[in-house]
Amino acid sequence: MIKVASMIQYEAAIPADGPKIGAVTYNRLKANMPLQYDSTSIYEAGLDGRGPDQVDYTADTPYNTRVNPGLPPTPIAAPGEYALEGAMEPVDEPWLYFVLTDTKEVTFTVSYQEFLDAKALCKSRGLGCG
């Protein structure tokens, strides 16, 4: 649960996103899907003294949740109250994807196509969605 909360802490744009990101995380784990959270690879890059723009998302490393299913080997942040609550009490939604679509707005989707549409919006707004 602490690992999940640490990812929520890093990924949430606002505290209300905590239980939503918790739902996505547990839904993906249940489906044995890679989490695909950039935050885990960014964390690992920081351990090696590299910045977020120097992450190799294709590398087979323990923290690369794009290629490895399951949780990273350690927490990636110190979770606060909303992140812990999001990990302990996720919302009951079928979401499998989320992406930042405005400075403090995250879009949650069930389908991959909806995710791609939201990701295109993120890119068009220059929010760092690679």
Image: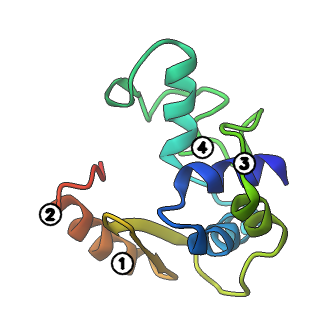
Q: CA distance from mark 1 to mark 4?
A: 20 Å
Q: Which residue occupies 64% across, 57% down? A: 8
Query: In terms of image quadrants, where is residue 92?
Result: bottom right
Q: Outermost residue, top direction?
A: 49
When the figure is inspected, residue 40 is found, relative to residue 97, above or below; the finding is above
Which of the two labelled residues, at mark 1 and mark 2, occupies the earlier sequence position? Answer: 1
| Disc number lying in front (2 or 4) | 2
Where is residue 93 drawn, in percent x and y?
A: 66, 87
**Mark 3 neighbour density, 10 Å: few (under 14) some (14–19) many (20 or more):** many
| Residue under label 2 | 124
Q: How busy is the neighbourhood of tag 1: few (under 14 within 10 Å), some, or many (20 plus)?
A: few
Sequence-wise, the earlier of marks 3 and 4 is 4
Q: Give the spatial CA distance, label 3 vs label 2.
A: 30 Å
Coordinates of residue 20 in the picture (x, y in percent):
62, 75
Of the image marks 3 and 1, the number of the one nearer the N terminus: 3
Residue 85 in the image: x percent, y percent?
78, 67
Which secondary structure, mark 1?
helix
| Residue 15, percent from left and from top | 59, 68
Residue displayed at 29% across by 48% down: 130
Q: Secondary structure at mark 4?
A: loop
**Circle 1 is placed at which residue position?**
113
Earlier sequence position, callout 1 versus callout 4: 4
Q: Which residue is mark 4?
A: 65
Which kind of residue does numbered mark 4 sit on? Thr
Q: Is residue 82 left or right of residue 58?
A: right
Mark closer to the chain start, 2 or 4: 4
* Label 3 sits on residue: 79
Kindly report which numbered mark, 3 or 2, lies closer to the viewer in this rendering. 3
